[in-house]
Image (cartoon, rainbow, N blue to C red):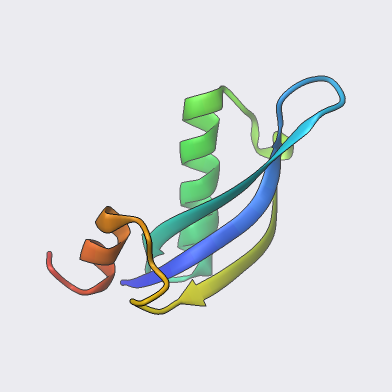
Amino acid sequence: MKAYRAIGEFKTGKFSWQKFSIEVAAENEAGVTEQIYSNLGSRHKLKRPQIRISEIKSITGDEITNHAVKYLAEGHQ
């Protein structure tokens, strides 16, 4: 698995958006997108159109701050 950082925003009210930056371990960018939609949708009761992902980039082991993502990305399965 690779580590990715997704940056975007999600709807919090009628006219307001909250920015986010989430680290995810996935096989490819499609898997990252699916995990972001799933996690934010379940945590904040959002539908997919209420989540905007503006950037997905691959990150190295030194840039990872989430311990669970680091564990999965380094192959300790």
Measuring from the top left, give residue 46's x and y in whole percent.
Answer: 62, 27
Is 37 in front, or is 67? 67
Q: Tell me if residue 71 comes above or below residue 20 in the rendering.
A: below
In the orientation shown, which residue stands out farthest toward the right? 15
* Rendered residue at 77%/21% (across/down): 13
Residue 60 falls left or right of residue 6? left
Quarter of the image that includes the C terminus: bottom left
Placement of the N terminus among the 4 image quadrants: bottom left
Q: Quadrant of residue 19?
A: top right
Identify the image quadrant of residue 68. Answer: bottom left
Q: Is residue 4 left or right of residue 74?
A: right
> How far from the left and from the top, in percent, is residue 52?
72, 47
Write the residue at 68% across / 51% down.
Answer: 8
Q: Is residue 1 above or below residue 31?
A: below
- Side of 2 where 34 appears, left or right: right
State how many labels appear.
0
> What percent of the width, then of the height, locates residue 66?
34, 56
Q: Residue at x 46, y 60 (%)?
A: 31
Q: Quadrant of residue 73?
A: bottom left
Asked if residue 32 lies left or right of residue 8, the reply is left
Q: Nearer the viewer, residue 33 or 55?
A: 55
Image point (48%, 27%), residue name: 43
